[in-house]
Image (spheres, helix red, strand yellow):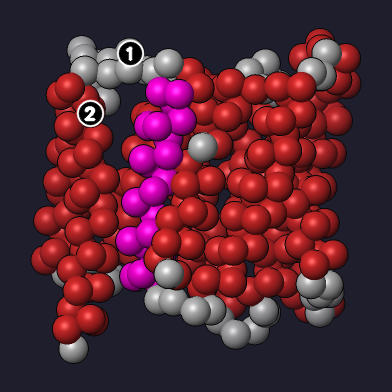
Amino acid sequence: MNIFLAMITAFFWGTTYAVTQFSLPDWPPMLLGAIRALPAGLILLAIKPSLPNKADWPILIKLGAINIAIFFSLIFVMALTLPSAISGVGMVSVPVFAMLFHWVVSKKRPNSLQAISGAVIIALAWLLFDPKSISLNPLGLAAMLAAISCIIVGSTMTKALGSRIHWWTVLTWQLIIGGSLLLVVAGIHASYAPEAYVAAVQHIDWRNAMGIAWIVLLNTALGYGLYVWLLQRMSVVDFAFGGIANPIAGIISGMILLGESFTAQQYLLMAGMILASVTPALIQLIRQRLD
């Protein structure tokens, strides 16, 4: 049951790209990030009020800047410049970059299964992102690599907190702080380039409203709240396996909302990357069930 709920969470996250392109195609990424983060953080705060200790504010500000402000901005740059399926599938390479990061920084060598899985993902990604077979926006690809870096650095910082700060407090105040930072930056940007902001505010229609509601309520407030709740009840391995729904959601929502289509070979490469990304978690899960 918990793995099914993890899949629901991951599925909501995977729809971010297509929902943004479909309902909010011309909105500035920083404004979208602020709208996604701040209301969701306030909703979670209302559900379970919490207040960090004075000594915890510096680390929470750093986490809010990296995990939310910068990361959400990059996610929306990806959403507005890359196909939904490519964004969703590309993010499954996060474990590979995390593995390399910890190998270089922490001298923690990956096991053979992780190394093989990582090599397969890199090889398939090389074929999928080949400029000869598919034309992709360089800005979107750069945003993807930067977003992956944010996940790795932010996750490392969050893990280092250990039991010092409760997970719910970290999550809630990351969203509030990150959303507030984005709101300030968006305001400054709007003072120099107001056209996109004015157009967004003056021409809000039902499609925009539905997109905002989806991203704030389901994608972020429910998605991240359920994520925290599940982390207390299931292992990281179980949750990682549930994450298979993320790229699948990117592919399906892109097909339904945006009419995206790829060749049979490209779909096979996507499927191979998804399968390779969950194989280590799947094998470990099977071993746990057999022990």
Residue type pointed to by label 1 = Ser
Eye-nearest disc, 1 or 2? 2
- In the rendered image, residue 101, in percent from the top left (x then y), is placed at 35, 58
Residue 177 falls inside the magenta stretch: no
Q: Who's the residue at 36% across and 40% down the image? A: 248
* Residue 201 lies in quadrant: top right
Q: Who's the residue at 18% across and 88% down the image? A: 291
Residue 249 falls inside the magenta stretch: yes
Determine which of the numbered discs, if any, sits on residue 135 in the image. Answer: 1
Which residue, as the protein is rendered here, is positioned at the far bottom? 291
Q: Is residue 198 visible?
A: no
Determine which of the numbered discs, if any, sits on residue 267 in the image. Answer: 2
**In the image, residue 204 above or below residue 68:** above
- In the rendered image, residue 72, in percent from the top left (x then y), is placed at 62, 41
**In the image, residue 80 above or below residue 172:** above
Residue extent of the magenta highlight? 236-256
